[in-house]
Amino acid sequence: MDQFDPFYMMIFLLGAGAGGFVTGLAGFGTALIVSAFWLHFMDPVVVAPLAAACSVVGQISALKGTWRHLQWKAVTPFLIGAFIGLPLGVWSLDYVEPGHVKVAVGVFLVGYSIYSLFFLFRGNIASIKIDNRFADGAVGIIGGVMGGVAGLSGPAPLIWCQLRGLAKTVQRGIYQPYNAIILATATGVHALYGRVDGEVGMAFLISIPATVIGSWIGTTLYHRLDDRLFNVIVQCLLLLSGAMLLGRSFF
């Protein structure tokens, strides 16, 4: 990114603000949104660690407005599973094609989101009545494996929370701290691999104010949503995530 070009700087800050807003509103989605802005003029090698770092900022900012609802006991099995699954996912890269995984996940996300939106609008979506730490840990392992293979650790626990029919505050109290910790770990991994250089560091510092302001606005709006509208927004974001995965795979 040319840091002194006013047009690109405007697009960069709009992306950071939009990413923070979505995270404040839904508890996830920073990387999805900022990538849609930044990949048009920034190298993907720069965008990946920068998006992860901005996601952490967005998550931390959003946590200030949802702190009392955090479910630390409930999120622990997901995190344990994720840290088991992450190295398994990285190891499996020698045997699977990440592009094929992204296509499969994209198809699943699109199909699941359309199915869920259909029943949400009908008002009769069913839920799975399971409250089991081993099941939560298994979902965490799936998320970790997906994170290691394709950087997609978030959808599994998010969908699991939705399938259980949890209230919006409980859902966010589980998957938001999960995402924050996993993304912070991903940022650290990028740093260990030397991907956080001066360009990324400078862009990150510039992005912080826009990300924080966007997150604050999103969190403020989140508190005005009822459970049904919150679930609709989450499903629309999952649908967009799946569509973007398929679009990047085929075009």
Image (cartoon, rainbow, N blue to C red):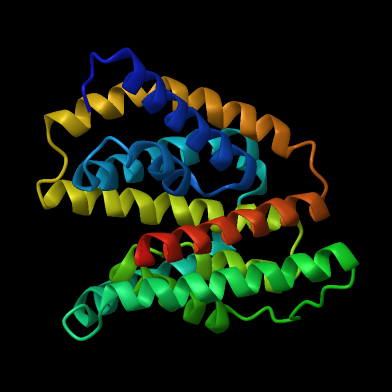
Q: Residue 188: image x %, image y %?
A: 23, 49
**Quarter of the C terminus within the rendering:** bottom left
> Which is nearer the eye, 31 or 4?
4
The residue most toward the left is 194
Residue 224 falls left or right of residue 210? right
In the image, residue 123 sits, relative to residue 204, either above or below, namely below
**Quarter of the N terminus within the rendering:** top left
> Which is nearer the eye, 74 or 233?
233
In the image, residue 58 sits, relative to residue 162, either above or below, namely above
The residue most toward the right is 123
For the point 30% across and 54% down, which residue is it?
A: 185
Q: Residue 168: image x %, image y %?
A: 73, 54
For the point 65% across and 55% down, which residue is it?
A: 236
For the point 69% across and 57% down, which residue is it?
A: 170
Residue 175 visible somewhere in the drawing: yes
Q: Residue 69: image x %, image y %?
A: 67, 48
Residue 232 falls left or right of residue 70? right
> Which is nearer the eye, 224 or 76?
224
Q: Residue 165: image x %, image y %?
A: 76, 69
> Which is nearer the eye, 121 or 214?
121
Total tally of numbered discs in the picture = 0
For the point 46% across and 57% down, which residue is it?
A: 244
The residue most toward the front is 251
In the image, residue 210 sits, relative to residue 176, either above or below, namely above
Residue 211 falls left or right of residue 220? left
For residue 6, what is the image quadrant?
top left
Residue 84 visible somewhere in the drawing: no
